[in-house]
Image (cartoon, helix red, strand yellow):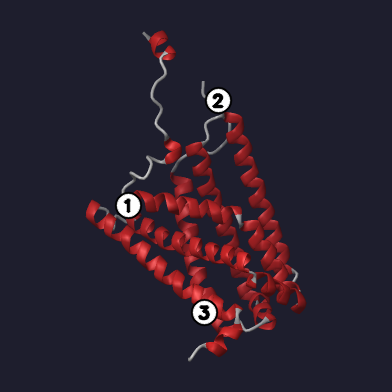
Amino acid sequence: MSAELRVRKRPKHLNVFLLGLQLPFPGMMSIVHRITGAGLFVMLGFILWFFEKSLASEADFMEVVGWLRHPIVLLIGLGLLWAFIFHFFMGLRYLALDADFMTDLKSARLTSFLVAVVSAGASVLVFALVIVTLYPEIRECLPL
Amino acid sequence: MKKFISTARYGMRDWLFQRVTAIVMAGYAVVFIGMAAWFGLDGFEGWRELFAFEPMRFLTFVFWVCVLVHAWVGMRDVVMDYIQPAILKLSLLSAVVLALVGCLGWMARILWRL
């Protein structure tokens, strides 16, 4: 019997596509939590590089600011900030789940939705702060 | 007989490390925002003073250790979940550890050169 099973190709579950787009919303959020975590890990070296340079001297600091003002670097930087913010709020949700808080299906779906909304909102605020800080020329154009 | 490839295992100890480091990092985030507001992030001087301030330097280092431990647990979970070939698993886990140890040394150098 086992020889037959070994020969026959068993249908393999395509984990690589993570069930396609059929993941329920909390599941989708969960995998984004994992992806943001891994993404942040990969960027640790770059973060340290920029951090080191920003503290080296006044001139180096201004150079880093110059780099951050570049659209592509800015995009990546904002992406990292969003990844951290999302990972952070999602992490809070997991801590709550560990404490048996809102673990039923309805509540779990609600909290995952809340995480999406709150992290998006916080990201927008942080982005605005970063952009206004990096581009002081924008401050002149603002009516504030 | 089970093949010994690495010490990475699912279990309570690492789960605890992940949670504890998360809470410490969240605490640091709050402290950082407060300290940044205090020192005033308006340029190089404020930025440098923030991290040269001895308590902040210490806390930042503790925070960084937490980041690395937290990242280790997370990345180890990812490797254990998705990588089956033993050699690949061992290589990736080793690479992650080495990268994290390197990051530890690098941060120590950055902070204590101030």
Identity of the amino acid at label 3?
Answer: Gly
* A27 horizontally vs B48: left or right: left
- Residue beneath the point at 66% across and 59% down: A46
User: In the image, residue B60 lies at what x, y percent?
Assistant: 60, 68
Identity of the amino acid at label 2?
Answer: Lys
Residue B40, can we see it? no
- Do callouts 3 and 2 point to residues on the same chain? yes
- Do callouts 3 and 1 point to residues on the same chain? no
Q: Which residue is mark 3?
A: B34
* B22 horizontally vs A107: left or right: right
User: In the image, residue B23 lies at what x, y percent?
Assistant: 46, 62
N-terminal label among 3 and 2? 2
- Answer few, some or many: residues within 10 Å of disc 3's Cα (few below 14, many 20 plus, some between 14 and 19): few
Labelled disc at residue B3: 2
Chain bearing tag 1 is: A
User: In the image, residue A8 lies at what x, y percent?
Assistant: 40, 14
